[in-house]
Amino acid sequence: CLDMKSRMEFHRKDLEHLIALLNTQVKPELTIIDGIYAMEHGPDLLGKAHRMNVIIAGKDNLSCDIVGSTVLGIESSSVEHLKEFASIEKRSLDISTVDMRGERIKDVAKELKWNRDPEDMFREAGVKGVSCQRPGKHFCSGCLISIESVLLAFCKDNMGITLDNIEICCGSEVKPKKESRKIFLVGNCSIRANKDVEDAIRVEGCPPKVGQTLVTFMNHTLE
């Protein structure tokens, strides 16, 4: 229900808070969660699909989200936007308060990991001498897909390579480490947040283009 400009604004400010507020304004008559497949680590290039064969539907969106998070093995009280929305509505996040019909949760639940360390792909490819901190809550899916595409392609073609203490920074929350010898600021948010970083290699874009980012990264690492 949001255009691209609004989505970007949500990420620049406080994503969890604004999602909670959005739920106070949008009152769907029916909420449907398509759980035929669930994606571990999210719906991006590194996500892994799991067949769940589940459809969650109801007239109350908070109840559906409580059930949805529980099916994925995530305590709903640990999800910030659900916790804030429940607080606004003066509602409980206890699964026992939800009136459910159909399958039992314990029969369909499957604990899936949702977060992924950006450096996992370096370790898996044996690439050393490069780091990429977790980008934080303000990192949007557009940049995520671009960065993962670039790093996946780079690691595939340069398995086992050792680089010279390179750091890739993404999103507005990450500050480069002092010991990094070469710093890439990828995306407009990272560039704005690190204006004081001298000699950084800046890749502009919202999100940055995959081809441009890959060429820039390779030109400055495979010298």
Image (cartoon, helix red, strand yellow):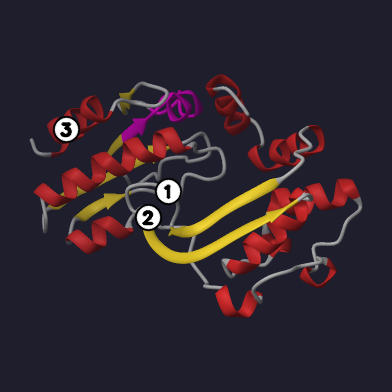
Q: Compared with residue 41, is residue 200 higher up or lower down, i.e. above or below?
A: above
Specify whether 58 is left or right of 55: right
Label 3, secondary structure: give it.
Answer: helix
Label 1, secondary structure: give it.
Answer: loop
Q: Amino acid at mark 2?
A: Gly
Residue 159, horizontal then vertical, whole percent: 11, 56
Query: Which residue position holds label 2?
Result: 47
- How far apart are the two marked residues, 2 and 1, measured between alpha carbons? 6 Å
Query: Which residue position holds label 1?
Result: 43
Mark in front: 3 vs 2: 2
Query: Which of the two discs, 1 and 3, labels the residue nearer the N terminus?
Result: 1
Residue pictured at 41% horizontal, 49% vertical: 133
Where is residue 54, by image quadrant? bottom right
| Segment colored magenta | 184-197
Residue 22 visible (yes or no): yes
User: Are there few (<14), some (14-19), or many (20+) residues within 10 Å of tag 1?
Assistant: some
Query: Which of the two discs, 3 and 2, labels the residue nearer the N terminus?
Result: 2
Name the residue nearer the viewer: 102 or 116: 102
186 in the magenta segment:
yes
Residue pictured at 74% horizontal, 34% vertical: 22
Specify whether 133 is left or right of 131: right
42 in the magenta segment:
no
Residue 181 visible (yes or no): no
Q: Amino acid at mark 1?
A: Pro
Residue pictured at 32% horizontal, 60% vertical: 120
